[in-house]
Amino acid sequence: MSIFRRLTGVVAPCCLLVGLTAICLSGCSKSEASSTPTGGITPQQFADGVHAVMMADRTVYATHVVTNLKKQDSPVTADEYWKDSENAIPLPAQMFRMGAELVAENPEAGFSYSLRSQWPLNEQHQPKSDFEQKALEFISEHPGDNFYGEEELGGKKYFVAVYPDRAVAEACWSCHNEHPNRGDGYPEFGQDDVMGGVLVRVPL
Ligand code: HEC
C-alpha cells in the first residue's frame, strides 16, 4: 500500500480555500508544486480542508433542511425519486453526488471528489481501480483513520485522500439496510460502521 509521503508541495499561494467550487489549483506551476513549503498548504492539507467543507455542507443540509422539514410535518420530504415525485427534494447523498458532478465538469476546479463504497446502492459509487479498492479496505479495517496515497492515472500523478463515511445516525443504516438496491453480501450496517468513503483526488 502506498502511504502518503509528506510532500514538500506548495499549493498556495495561488489558491484560496473559499468554498467547494471556488478553489484554484490550475495556476500552480510544476516547480512551485514541488518546492519547499513557504507557508503554503500541502496536498493533504488541501484535501483535508475541502473534505471539511463537504462534510459541513452535507451535515447542514441533512440537519437543517431534511430533518427540519420532517420535524415540521412538512409535505416536502427528501426522496430518492425526487425528480419524479411531488414535494420532494434530493437525499443528502444525491446532493453530494450532484455537487461532485458539477465540480468534475468545471475545468477551473483543479481537483475532483466522489463518494465510494465497496457496497454501493448506486453503482456509480463502486471503486474504479485496485488503488481505490485498497483504500476502501484500509478505512474499513482501520476505523478512525483516513487513507492517504498517490496514484498514477494516464501517466499523471495524483494525491488521493479517502475519508471514512460512517453510520452516524439510525437513518443511515435503516435506509441502507432496507434498500432494494442491496447487492449480494450487502452488510447489515449498524452504529458507527464505515459505510463507504469520500475520495478527494488532487493532481500533483
Ligand atoms: C433515505 C435513505 C438514505 C439515508 C437516510 C442515507 N442514505 Fe446513504 N445513500 C442512499 C442512496 C439512495 C444512495 C445512492 C445515492 C445516489 O444515487 O447517488 C446513498 C449513497 C450513500 C453512499 C455512497 C455509496 C452507495 O451506497 O451508493 C454512502 C457512503 C452513504 N450513502 C452513506 C450514508 C450515511 C453515512 C448516511 C447517514 C449519515 C446515509 N447514507 C443516509 C440512501 C440513504
Image (tube, helix red, strand yellow):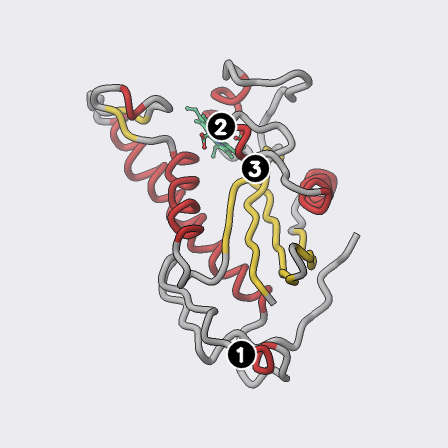
Could you tell me which secondary element the residue under label 2 belongs to?
helix
Residue drawn at x 63%, y 40% as measured from the top left: 128
In the rendered image, the vertical position of residue 185 relative to residue 40, given as above or below: above
Q: Determine crowd level at label 2: few under 14, some 14-19, many 20+ residues with C-alpha closer than 10 A.
A: some
Q: Determine crowd level at label 1: few under 14, some 14-19, many 20+ residues with C-alpha closer than 10 A.
A: few
Position of residue 199 in the picture relative to residue 138 (left or right): left
Could you tell me which secondary element the residue under label 1 belongs to?
loop
Residue drawn at x 55%, y 45% as measured from the top left: 198
Which residue bears the numbered disc 1? 29
Could you tell me which secondary element the residue under label 3 belongs to?
strand
Determine the image quadrant of residue 75. top left
Which residue bears the numbered disc 3? 166
Q: Determine crowd level at label 3: few under 14, some 14-19, many 20+ residues with C-alpha closer than 10 A.
A: many
In the rendered image, the vertical position of residue 203 relative to residue 10, given as above or below: above
Kindly tell me whether mark 3's CB lies below 8 Å from ligand 1. yes
Kindly tell me whether mark 2's CB lies below 8 Å from ligand 1. yes
Q: Amino acid at mark 2?
A: Cys
**CB contact under 8 Å: marks 3 and 1:** no
Q: Which mark is residue 172?
A: 2
Quadrant the C terminus occupies: bottom right
Between 4 and 151, the one lying in front of the other is 151
Name the residue furthest front: 154
